Structures are given as C-alpha cells and as structure tokens.
Image (cartoon, rainbow, N blue to C red):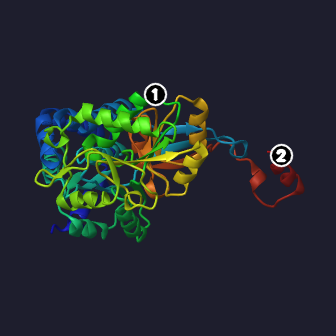
Amino acid sequence: MADFSKILKNQRRFFSTGQSKNLAFRLQCLKKLQHWIGCHEEDILAALKTDLNKAPFEAYATEVGTVLDELRFTLKHLQRWSRPQRVLSNLKNFPSLGRIYPEPYGVALLISPWNYPFMLTLTPLIAAVAAGNCAIVKPSAYSPAASSLLAKMCTEVFDAGHVALVQGGRKENAALLDERYDMIFFTGSTAVGRSVMQAASRYLTPVVLELGGKSPCIVDETAPLKQAAKRIVWGKFVNAGQTCVAPDYVLAHASIQKKLLEEMSAAIQTLYGEKPLENSDYPKIINEKHFHRLLGLLKGEKIVLGGNSHLASLKIEPTLLDSVSWDAPLMKEEIFGPLLPVLGYDSLEEAAQWINARPKPLALYLFSASKKNQSYVLRHVSFGGGCINDTLVHLSIPRLPFGGVGDSGMGSYHGKAGFDAFTHHKSVLHKSRHMDIPLRYPPYTDFALQLLKKV
C-alpha cells in the first residue's frame, strides 16, 4: 500500500507554493485535460466497454460528452467566478466596502464510484482544480480499466503534487480516510457516505456527499403515456439501471397503470429488442456480487416483462414488475439495476405521502400535463433534483446544481455550484482610514443609544 501521508505532504507542499491558486495555471490545467480527453477518446470508450459493456454512443453521451460540457462551461466562466465580489456595507460602518474573496480549501480528497467511473471522477476534479485546490483522487476498484486509464491521465496532465491518483479497494479507502484533508468529496452509497462523514468529523473536515436512494417516478392520469413510457424506460435502463438518479420505482395513477405497463413493455422491446441479453450494446452488471443481489430481489415478485439473466455475460434483462408491496425487499433498498417496480396510487396526495414517509430521494420525476399537479408535487415533496416530463437529463445542464438532501446527500456541484463547493468565500470589510465616527466608542450616552437605534 502506498504511503498516503507522504502523498498528502507532497500535495500540501505544492499547495503552499500558491501555484494552484494562479488563474492562468488553473486555466492551463483544464485546457490540458480537455486536450487529453480529445486525444484519448477511443481509449476512454474502450475502458467503459470493458468495465460496463457501455455502447460507444451511451458512453459518450453519459460520460465523455458530459465531462467536455463541464470543461467548456468552466473554462468560459472561471475568470468571472474567481473575481472578488463587491457587496454593499451598511450605514453603521460608513464609509466602508465589503468584498467576498473566493479561495480554495487546500487539499481535497475525491472518492468516486464505479457506475460512471469517468464522469463521476472528472466532474468533481474539474471543480476542485478550477477552484485552486490540490487533489488526491481515489476511483473505484470495481472499474479497473477506467481507473487505470484515469491514473495514466493524471500523470500526463497534472504535476504529481497537484493531482495524485490512488488505486485500490476498501483498505486503501480506509487508509486514505485516516488522513486529514481540507475537504472531502464522496460519491457513492448512503451507507458508505455515513462512514466518510464519520471519518471527516474527527478533523471537522467539510464534506460534499453525493449519495443515492429510491428515486420515484410519478405518472398521473394526464400524462402522454407513450412518450412517458419511452423516457422512463430510457432513464431506468441506461447503464443497466446502475445510475444513482435512475427512476427506482414508478407510481402510476390507478386509472392508467395497466396501459403504462403495456407502453413500457413495448418501449423496452423497441429500444433493446426482444432478446436484450443478446444485444451487444446492452450494458452488464458490474460484478457477480451485484448480479446475484439483484436476482435475489426478484424472488416472489410478479414479473410483467423480462426477468431472464445470463451469468457469463453478467446481464439481466430490463425487467418490469407489477403489484409490488411497499414491504417487499425490492422496496427496502435502492435497486441500482435493471428492475423497475410499478405501483398504483389513487390520489396525488396519497403518492406524496408514500414518498415523504421514506428517506428523501436524490431525484424525482413527474410526468403530467397538469400545471396544478406539477405545482403540488414541487410544493409538497422534498428531493435533490429532477425533471418534469423527462428523466435524468437535469444532470446535463451545468447551470443546474446537482446534489441530494437528507439521506441522499449534502452539498451540490456542476458549473458554478462545483466551483463554490471547493471554495471558501472569505468575507472582508474594507474600512476607510479618513473618517472615524465616534458613536461606537465609550463613554456611552443616552443620545448615542437613541441614535444607534435609529440607524
């Protein structure tokens, strides 16, 4: 195992030089990263194919293209984000001027998952570098091809003291978390997120936790069902359902539940064919452990479509389930795979109550043509983010902060929110030397008190 204390000392030494804070240096590093991605696009797609069997289009759309969008947006706006911001003072401090100075935290630890190993490693890294931090990056051992390529990228793009990448599994994660950082950014499960926060609490280290949960998808009686079905099926089964913001279950109004199941069944066959296990573009489950966990969730459930699997290829068909109980194992944990339960509801109030009775989800999706229903859900249900009449795509907009709430996480990133996540906003009041109002100084008088109350 690498000497993590030594790596951390090297990062702190680099940060102390002030080089990572220099705007020109930050822009140069981000441009080098952009160029490297352009030169190694085929290598990235090949690594994602190896780890998850992602088709080139899906891999580019959900990983490479998303990272490039984030880079372009950051490069365009970084100079403005980095400027001190003037704010008005108040009459009590006249004459004076307030300024907010953005400054990096220092050395950040970034722990990323296996399901989108390229995008979920580089998007926070872009934010960390843009804000002027040094970083230690720890990708997942479950996606070895992507992790190996990311290690190559770090050595070719960044100085070792600026960005260092550590490979390994749980032992390396635990050893890394024993060290003291200036900020920790973690993407993964809620259970591991609790451990990360516990480790950070020893040093009062600020954290951003991007977790998961059971993200609901509501379909009301006014929704165009054919379009809704296609968008739900796409959002659920991209990456074989191994997406933290995938629709975890569907709440369908009782009057359209049967028709929606029919439309989703048809959409699955259109998108993935009648034999999805033979579709070379259909992604695989990351490993045997998760493969068998998912099959275990199917036991005793009513399968409408799918349910077949192939151990050798680690593939499970897109699977629809009906009449699932809220007490079923399928509804007790985040599914994180290609299984989609559909439950009925009679009123929107009832649906909202069911969702609110459980931990706050990372995402929520509502399919409805009713502005009244849209407004009701937005007012009465708390969730990290989501879409009206679509799924997943809110992640693709850098201007929309992405993050969870409650059990689904804390803090947000993407675009300016990412820069802010890795930045301390230092507030400073600049006071004039040419005037000094004596009101605040003792001895105090009744007149001074009355004047203070007025101002």
Pointer 1: what residue? 224
Give percent across and percent down for residue 455.
79, 45
Residue shown at 29%/42% (left/top)? Answer: 237
- Along the line of sight, the residue nearer the viewer: 124 or 282: 282
Decide: is 290 above or below 305: below
Query: Which of the 4 quarters of the picture holds residue 122?
Result: top left
Give percent across and percent down for residue 90.
69, 42
Q: How many marks do you count on the picture?
A: 2
Amino acid on which disc 1 is placed: Pro
- Along the line of sight, the residue nearer the viewer: 319 or 46: 319
Pointer 2: what residue? 454
Q: Are marks 2 and 1 in contact (CB under 8 Å)?
A: no
Query: Which of the 4 quarters of the picture holds residue 58?
Result: top left
Amino acid on which disc 2 is placed: Lys
Q: Earlier in the sequence, mark 2 or mark 1?
A: 1
- Along the line of sight, the residue nearer the viewer: 403 or 53: 53
CA–CA distance between discs 2 and 1? Answer: 60 Å
Q: Tag 1: Cα neighbours inside 10 Å, few (<14), some, or many (≥20)?
A: some
Direction from residue 225 to residue 44 in the image, left or right: left
- Along the line of sight, the residue nearer the viewer: 37 or 102: 37
Give percent across and percent down for residue 194.
40, 65
